[in-house]
Structure formats: structure tokens, C-alpha cells
Image (tube, rainbow, N blue to C red):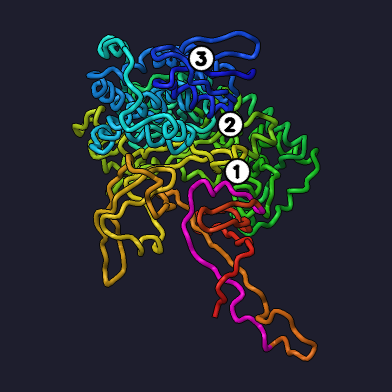
Amino acid sequence: MEEARLAFAQDSPPLAIIAAAKIACVSLTIDPSLASGSAPTLHLSSGDFIHGINTILRYIARAATVPSFYGQDAIQAAHVDQWLEYAPVILSGSEFEAACSFLDGFLASRTFLVGYSLSIADILVWSNIAGTGQRWESLRRSKKYQNLIRWFNSIAVDYLALDEVVAAYVGKRGIGKSPAPSLQEKVQDWKVNTSGPEIDLPGAKVGEVCVRFAPEPSGYLHIGHAKAGLLNKYFAERYKGHLIARFDDTNPSKESNEFVENILEDIDTMGIKYDTVTYTSDYFPKLMEMAESLIKQGKAYVDNTPKQQMKDERMAGTESKCRNNTVEENLSLWREMVNGTEIGMQCYVRGKLDMQDPNKTLRDPVYYRCNTDHHHRVGSKYKVYPTYDFACPFVDALEGVTHALRSSEYHDRNAQYHRILQDMGLRRVEIYEFSRLNLVYTLLSKRKLLWFVENKKVDDWTDPRFPTIQGILRRGLKIEALVQFILEQEQFVRILPRHKKYEGAGNKATTFTSRIWLEYADASIMSTGQEVTLMDWGNTIIKEIKTENGIITQLVGELHLEGSVKLTKLKLTWLPDIEDLVSLSLVEFDYLITKKKLEKQDDFVKYLNPCTRRETSALGDPNMRNLKQGEIIQLERKGYYRCDVPFIRPSKPIVLFAIPDGRQQPRAN
């Protein structure tokens, strides 16, 4: 953007333009020389000029390199334009509180006014509100519009330039008023959706998202499947994308057309609209071609080791005797499998990955096995069937899926999913994890539910005692209540930068819950009535401190998001109270000897340090599951650590070694 001079009237500085220029790193020469009532003008070095607040804002948005500053697409740009037109309502005298009320409702389930990142619409509305000075501050103290206050404070924290501009140009009484049309005239065409949580899908782009709901037709859908289905529906609608209903029919022994028909019925009952219905069995020919290709490339082999022995070897990390078969030997055994011969029935196709990997799912997983049972769609055409772990990433990639939603119980298999795609030479599919539902007095395992059906403990899959969709509806639960129940289990999730000052560090998903974890050391120095800051969230006021035998067991607080982060003494790190937190082992090392420099006559044994390693157990953010061995990470308020042992499974902690920072540590005794 070329050099420019911004001329405006001193009594009405264009806060939004000045702030937008700062955020976009656009250099402006400030010239408050125009007569009172004059609209601002941007004079360019080329001799051209741009007149009017909205026109100048559009110019800055188009010329700046800030992503999505004018929306991500034409539709979002149109929404930005609407806000540019409506924003003066904020300064329209008697309409001010009505505008705040409208904005409060509009922002109930949104982080930004348009799309999922900051735009000039946010800057203009924020600036106009801040420009009223004391009038807005009075409303903030009244806590009347919590959603609007949350948005206002969040924008201010993330974009400090806004507060700087306000401090420089706004007095206690504000900067005056501007004419505006009636609020009712301007908001009647806006659709406000204040229901449900706000959950971001990492890396998602509007119009480009494709998700899939892929149940196995081995039973009726139950309440656990409902969560997966509704989440896929949510993301498809939120990002104006596509939803595929796919049947993962790779095990003919368990599946039937009855289950297919009833699953489709349940999907319709839940109001899940899909673009197409597909079957993994549609891809059986291509899956077999891929398996044979991997064998020829040496990325897979055929193993005739007995099943239990194979399992034991995987647990021990012992390579199979078949792992080094020649390609010809493997292809010969593969043909035996395809033909369903006696020899073939004893074989399995396994991926040649890494038998020593601490993540056991990467220890040469099974890709194909024999099964001569009748398949509900293809009959007896095939004698070999792919495993779910082999077929799922392949079909996801071929069908154009951008984000595969999987419950967190599959987390250990994520590395396997991506490795298989890599070996196949297919594009990467992002995985989005969600926590599975844990219900009391209820079974959600289809294998166990099938036992009840087969043993006549219930009438059938629609029995009112069953957690199936049809069962709970027969019990009297309304589908609307079911949907509401599922949505109430979802926490508020935002995608935040890993490092506030280094964009290259990437993003992380942060979950906000009503219950959080704090460090005990922080809790021990708090007092009732104290206002503290929860980092990346906002302020909260401590209402109650509960103790047991002198030990603090719980703090009760109330969010005070309109509070000033600058005025609090304690800035606290925290973790959401969710199942997906990971176990950590934080390790610090000390010198092996206690004397700075040994003399020749010194017996070094006398100076041995009795404690050279300290290990502290801790909990960590779920994003830490993705740490790689050797990767450096900063734990806020603690320091830098090197990952020595990455995440393997929930029962084994991630091991982090503290990196010395030069500060003197207290000597261990």
C-alpha cells in the first residue's frame, strides 16, 4: 500500500481507520486539520484521494495482507458491507442501548461478527462502541450485555492497537454522535442464531469442508452415534460444506440390510441432511488393487503366523518370520487369500511399518484378512476383506473428505491413519477428535447390545430399555430433547495461536468449560473477592474458597469478562476439566557434584549431589498429544522443555526435560 496522509476533523477522529491501519501495519501520516463535521479523506502519494470512513476502510482491507480482513469470500464481504452501513447505529443517541441489545444476541454464539477471524466489521463496531467513552463504560460495569462485553474484551486483548487508539483520541465523554438510520430498519433482515455451542474446525474453509458420518451396519444407531452424527451435521452446515453418509461394511459376519435401512431411518429422524450415501464395499476392487500395490512396493507383506502368536509378537515388538518374505512369496500367498484356499485362510496382509514403535498401532497392523461369510451387498464375490484401519483412510481420501471426525478413543490410531495415507501416496485428511459419551447404567457396545437381543433379554433393537435412537424414542424422549442433550455435552472451543507473538508456531484448539484446573500454588495465594485473570479467557472474581483439613479443595468463581486484564495482579494458566487431558512427567536435572571446581586432592565421591533428578507429575493440554520426540515446547510461566518421550497411550505420561535458562535453581537436599 502506498504512502498516505489521513486528514480528519479534530473533534471526530476516525478511530476505525486509524486502528485498522495499525493492525494492518499500514503507515499513515495523521493530519487533524479539517473543519468540524468534515468526513475523513485519505490522500495518496500518487495524487489520488479516498473520501469517507467506509470507503477508506474498504481500501485498507483490500490493500492489506491481513487474512480475511474483508471476509473469506463474496458472501462474507457482503456481510462486512452490511456492518459498515449499520455500525453508526451504535452512536445514534437513544438507539445506543437497543443496538447493544441486538449485538449481545447476535454474538451469543460467535467470536467475530463475520466468519471466524477479525475483519474491518469488528474494528468499526468496536471503535464506535469505544468512541462513546463513559456511556459504554457504564454499561460494561452493569454487566447487562455479557456476550457483547465478552466480544469487546476479547478483541481488545488480542488486538492491543485498538486500546492504544482509544487512549489517544477518546475522552471520558466520548467523541460525539453521528447520524444513523433507525435500528429496527437496519436489523430486520439479519438472522440471529443464539443456540448451541461454538466449535471451530481446525484449518476449515467455508465452502470447502467435507465430512462423513460412517457407522458400521452391524446394529441400530444408539445415543453415542447420535453425537457423532450431529457433530458432522454441525460442521457441514457451519462451513457450508458436504456431508457423506457412508456405511463401513467391511465385516460380512456382523452386517445386514436390516441395519442399513434402520440406520438411514435414524439419520432422517435426527434431521441429518446428507449429500450422498456411499458404502465402503463400493471401493473393494480399488482397495484390493491398493493392497497388491503396497505388497509389490515392499510396504506390506503376507503373514501366516498363528493369530495369538502374531498378537504376542506385536506386544513384544518382535518381527514376524514372514516380514522379510520376497515380493514373489507375498504375492503367491496373497493369491491364496483372494481365492479363499485353506492356505490363504491362515494368512493376513500386514503393513510393514515399525515393530519397535512405542505406539503399538504402528507395529505392522493387519490390512486384509479372509472371510467366506455372505456379504449383505456383494454376496460371495470376495473371500478377503479390508480392515477398518486400512479402508477408512483410503476411502476418506478418495471421497474428498477434508476432516474425519473420530472419538478420542481412537487417538492412538491417528498416527497409523496418517502413516497409511502416506504409504498409499494419498493426500492428507485432517482428524478432528471429540470425546465419547459416557453414560451410567448403560451399554453402548454394539457387541454387548447384540448379546441382549440374541439372548432374548430384550424384545429387539427398538426395545425401550435400549440406548438406541428408536429405543429411547419409544421410551418417550423427543428427538428435540435428544439433540439438546447432545449439544449440552459440547464445550466451547476456540482456535488460538500457540504463540501470541509468533504466527509460525501455528494454532491450537482450546476448550472452555465451567470447571477448570488451576495450580495449587496459585490457589493458595488467592483470597475471597479477589479478581484474577485466566489467560486467553478473561477475568474472574473468586467468590468462595473451600477447604478440607486445611487443604484447598475447590475455588468458586464468577466470570467478569468486562474486567480489565491490566489491573489484576494474578495472571493464571489453567486447564479445562475434560477427559482428554494428558499425563506429564516434568523432569529437572542438577549437577552431578556439589563443588564448583574440584581440586586434584579432592575425592569427588565426597561431593556427589544426592539429588540430581527431580520428577514432577502434572496434567497437560490435549494438544500436547501431538508433540514429537525432540520437539521444544514452552510451558507458560514455567519455562522451556524438550520432549523426551512423546504421547503413547493415556496410561503412560509424556516425559518433558526442563531446558536450563541460566537462572539459579534452589539446591535439592
Q: How many numbered marks are there?
A: 3
For marks 3 and 2 on the same chain, the one whose residue lies earlier in the sequence: 3
Q: Which of marks 2 and 1 is nearer the N terminus?
A: 1
* Residue at x 70% of width, y 87% of height: 605
Q: Nearer the viewer, residue 126 or 289?
A: 126
Task: State how far apart marks 2 and 1 are (Cα).
Answer: 12 Å
Magenta-colored span = 606-630
Secondary structure beneath label 1: helix
From what the image shows, is residue 81 above or below residue 267?
Answer: above
State if disc 2 and disc 3 touch (CB < 8 Å): no
| Amino acid type shown at disc 1 | Ala
Secondary structure beneath disc 2? loop
Residue 443, located in which quarter of the rendered image? Answer: top left
User: Residue 444 at x, y = what percent?
Assistant: 35, 42
How much space separates mark 1 and mark 3, taking CA atoms? 48 Å
Q: On screen, 388 above or below 627? A: above
Residue occupying the point 63% across, 52% down: 632
Q: In screen coordinates, is 315 left or right of 93?
A: right
Measuring from the top left, give residue 277's x and y in whole percent: 47, 19
Where residue 584 sits: x, y (%)? 52, 59
Q: In which quarter of the image is residue 521?
A: bottom left
| Circle on res. 415 | 1
Of residue 515 and residue 391, the one placed in the foreground of this image is 515
| Label 1 or label 3, whichever comes before in sequence order | 3
Residue for badge 2: 429
Find disc 3 in the rendering and name its residue.
Answer: 56
Q: Which quadrant is the N terminus positioned in? A: top right
Residue 304 location in percent, x, y? 68, 47
Circle 3 Cα neighbour tier, 10 Å, few/some/many (<14 / 14–19 / ≥20): many
